[in-house]
Image (cartoon, rainbow, N blue to C red):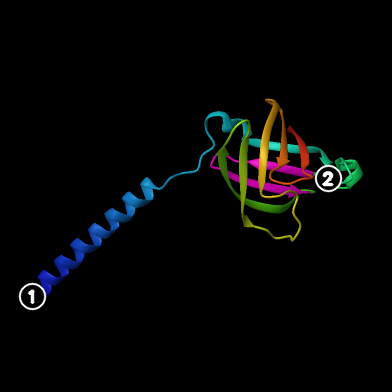
Amino acid sequence: MFMKTKTILNSQVIVLLALLLIMAASCKKDRLDGAYNRLVGEWEWLWTAGGVTSSFDTPDSAGFTITLIFEERGIYKIDKNNERLERGRLNIVNSEPYSLIDFVIELKPQSEYFFMSQQQVYFWSDDSLVLRDDLCADCFSRGFVRK
């Protein structure tokens, strides 16, 4: 009787482990592919323009630097003066005439925000891009160059 119960338990454990392995292997991996693979890398903030007062800031006038890092796995990081401001994952939404990126925050050690979570993405070239706040009346745009 004891041997039969042990065999049944071993069978159940093996089946459970097999199911867990199948589930882990089949999980959707958020990768930046296709046109979005152009985002992968480090981007240095050059300017911000917009708002009600039509302001214009640069790292010199603002007194800080921003580095935006996109990883192949769909992870982003924002560093301010080489300290982590934010980390999360990307959700890319295709729409015409531009694409939207949702920055889904997972870690926010500081309480400030560099931009709103949903951004329109425009590539000026392979080495420069503009992120623009979406769905607002007095939006800000931010220019970045690849590091």
Categorize mark 2 by other alpha carbons within 10 Å: few (<14), some (14-19), many (20+): some
Question: Label 1, on which residue?
Answer: 1
Q: Amino acid at mark 2?
A: Gly
The answer to whether residue 56 is left or right of residue 133 is right
Magenta residues? 66-80
Q: Nearer the viewer, mark 2 or mark 1?
A: 2
The answer to whether residue 52 is left or right of residue 106 is right
Describe the element under mark 2 as helix, strand or loop: loop
Q: Which mark is residue 51?
A: 2
Q: Nearer the viewer, residue 10 or 140?
A: 140
Q: Name the image quarter holding residue 15.
A: bottom left
The answer to whether residue 39 is left or right of residue 84 is left
Earlier residue among tags 2 and 1: 1
Q: Position of residue 44 (x, y in %)?
A: 76, 38
Q: Which residue: 10% across, 69% down?
A: 4
* Circle 2/circle 1 CB separation < 8 Å: no
Q: Position of residue 31 (x, y in %)?
A: 51, 39
Q: Is residue 63 above or below residue 31?
A: below
Q: Position of residue 20 (x, y in %)?
A: 33, 55
Quadrant that contains the N terminus: bottom left
**Which residue lies most toward the bottom here?**
1
**Which residue lies most toward the left here?**
1
Q: Which residue: 76% across, 57% down?
A: 112
Q: Nearer the viewer, residue 126 or 71?
A: 126
Describe the element under mark 1 as helix, strand or loop: loop
Q: Amino acid at mark 1?
A: Met
